[in-house]
Amino acid sequence: MSDYGMSKAVADSVENRRMYADRRQFGWRTVIFGFLRSRRRAVRRGGDSDMLFVDWHHPWLFFLAVGTMLLSVTDAALTLQLLARGMIEANPIMDRVMGYGTVAFVSLKLGLTAFGILTLVFLAKIRFLDRIRTGLFLTLFFSGYACLVCYEIVNLLKLL
């Protein structure tokens, strides 16, 4: 018997099983499998009705998150074009960041947007003030960015 109360044959068997690749290794297969076969889509028990965090989110949230990020990139590019043509930055914080250069401006803008999107997707099931799901804010931000990009395109066409 070994120190743990196992016979030598059992200890050798355990040792042999550990020589094979660990099935719990993380890789792209894990990501794809976890995305396609997410298990926690809803609460499991009746008492978990206030569960906030799940493994699976509605595809609409994915569309809103990616769309908002793409609109943010478009907004940054159009803002730089408008500034090059003589317009001024209306946001005083971003105007100050522009003093550090375009890389700082774009990095901060996209970083803040990405952080906000990830936070809203993560907290999508929480109710703000016990009434409004926070996922609705992502829809509002997407709509706001879409209007802003349209406004910038109109101004850019006027300046051409």
Image: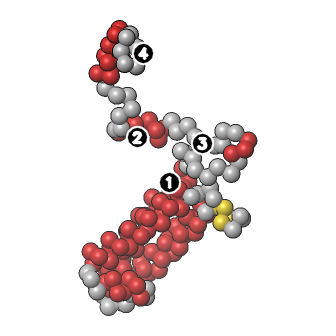
Q: Secondary structure at mark 4?
A: loop
**Mark toward the viewer: 1 or 2:** 2
**Residue 102 image-quadrant placement:** bottom left
Amino acid type shown at disc 3: Arg
Amino acid type shown at disc 1: Phe
Q: Is residue 4 visible?
A: yes
Q: Secondary structure at mark 3?
A: loop
Amino acid type shown at disc 4: Gly
The reply to whether the C-beta atoms of the residues labelled 1 and 2 are less than 8 Å apart is: no
**Residue on which disc 4 sits:** 5
Q: Describe residue 12's horizontal placement relative to residue 48 as left or right.
A: left
Q: Residue at x 32, y 77 (%)?
A: 105
**Mark toward the viewer: 1 or 4:** 4
| C-alpha span from label 4 to label 2 | 39 Å
The reply to whether the C-beta atoms of the residues labelled 1 and 3 are less than 8 Å apart is: no
**Mark toward the viewer: 1 or 3:** 3
Which of marks 4 and 1 precedes in the sequence? 4
The reply to whether the C-beta atoms of the residues labelled 4 and 3 are less than 8 Å apart is: no
Which of marks 2 and 1 precedes in the sequence? 2
Position of the N terminus by quadrant: top left
| C-alpha span from label 1 to label 2 | 16 Å
**Residue on which disc 1 sits:** 62
Determine crowd level at label 1: few under 14, some 14-19, many 20+ residues with C-alpha closer than 10 A. Answer: few
Q: Residue at x 32, y 73 (%)?
A: 106
Q: Position of residue 154 (x, y in %)?
A: 44, 81
